[in-house]
Amino acid sequence: MHSLEKLIESRQAQVGIVGLGYVGLPLAVEFAGAGLRVIGFDMQPAKVDSVNSGVSYIGDVPDERLVPLTKSGRLRATNNLSDLGQCDAICICVPTPLDKNKTPDISYVAGTADTIAQNLRDGQLIVLESTTYPGTTEEIILPRLTATGRTVGKDFYLAFSPERIDPGRKDFTTANTPKVVGGVTPQCTELAAALYSTFNPRVHRVSSPRVAEMEKLLENIFRLVNVSMINEMALLADRLGVDIWEVIEAASTKPYGFMPFYPGPGLGGHCIPIDPFYLSWKAKEVNFSPRFIELAGEINDMMPHYVTTKVIVALNRQKKCVNGSKILVLGVSYKKDVEDVREAPAVHIIKELWRKFALVTYCDPHVRSLSIGGRSVERVEFTDEALREADCVLILTDHTAFDFDRVAEKSRLIVDTRNAITRRDLSHVYHL
């Protein structure tokens, strides 16, 4: 048995997690909970202090899960990157954003690889989890590590294992969602599989990092294309005077050949609006035009504008102008019952309403403050008075905490983008 594999199986290995965000912190907690020693690295002092104090800033990691791990010394956080040299295995969980032209920004991955190279020692396993285009592990990270004079598969080990995080989900978490791993060499794959097997028994091995990298993109492209398709159907149904929600309900009675997707104000979060365009960008290197991805992106990008137009039309029917109207937004996170506002449609919709001089407030039990472009959005509590005072209540996120029967009863005008109000006999409710 390989010496690193022995360390992992005996729970003597020390694991480093670079990036303590929505991916990194849950991963760190799972490794520490499995008995491994974990060092979390993050350059934001507030996150480091919070983890070391046992206070979680991620909804999927409750304080009661974090506290015993930090108190026992199984998990600690630091911004001292030289401690990477103490780790037997290192997981990279840093951001991979797009710029305004939808070009991948892999500077965080490259910078982390440079830092690991400076602290690399023989026998270490490096695993990239950040979503990226096929080839990143071998084209960006591998050359930086081999530049130290070491050989992959002999002196160090390198693999890719895509994160599979769905914030707020209780049935499938980091602990029980199958892990895909693909190493640069077979030994790299086996060591990465051994590492993740410490907390997750379902590990699927693939032949290379490129396969694992593309597999993650396929997951997200599948959802992007299907949600954008149903959004386009919703736009068409609206023009035809057909209720798209009733259409979906009817189609869902078919026991085969159909999977329901639902329209909404746009896609948000850290994956679906961003990750597919990594593959779109990479495809152009080989003179291939991924038309489904780009068309789906265009449809998704137009949904916030469509919702804003829906609000304007609804106000016009009440003989009101959007200029000066009080718009109460219910829910600003990108999905139900989470605090995550990354790429949330609400951000784009509020900006557009501001440009039309609407007076916007929001209510969200999970988001305590919201700033868009340096301008704060006023937060209000979910009260009858707030509902009555609004010229239009705009439902963007259907949080469980909202009583939508109460919303329907107390509000003068509602635009519902989530089918939260299922009644169709209410003349003051406009559905997407």
Image (cartoon, rainbow, N blue to C red):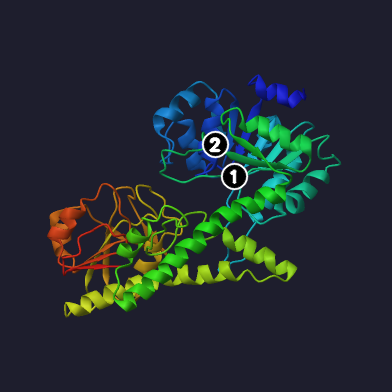
Write down the residue under mark 1.
93
- What amino acid is found at the position of numbered circle 1 in the picture? Cys
Mark 1, secondary structure of its residue: loop
Relative horizontal placement of residue 85, taking residue 303 as reference (left or right): right
Q: Position of residue 137 (x, y in %)?
A: 72, 49
Residue type marked 2:
Leu
Q: Residue at x 70, y 39 (%)?
A: 126
Residue position for label 2: 27
At 21% from the left edge and 80% from the top edge, which residue is drawn?
316
Measure the alpha-carbon separation of dots 2 and 1. Answer: 9 Å
Point out the tag, 2 or 1, that comes first from the N-terminus: 2
Residue 341 seen: yes
Residue in view at x 15 percent, y 62 percent? 411
Dot 2: what SS? helix
Q: Quadrant of the C terminus?
A: bottom left
Q: Position of residue 228 (x, y in %)?
A: 46, 66
Quadrant that contains the N terminus: top right
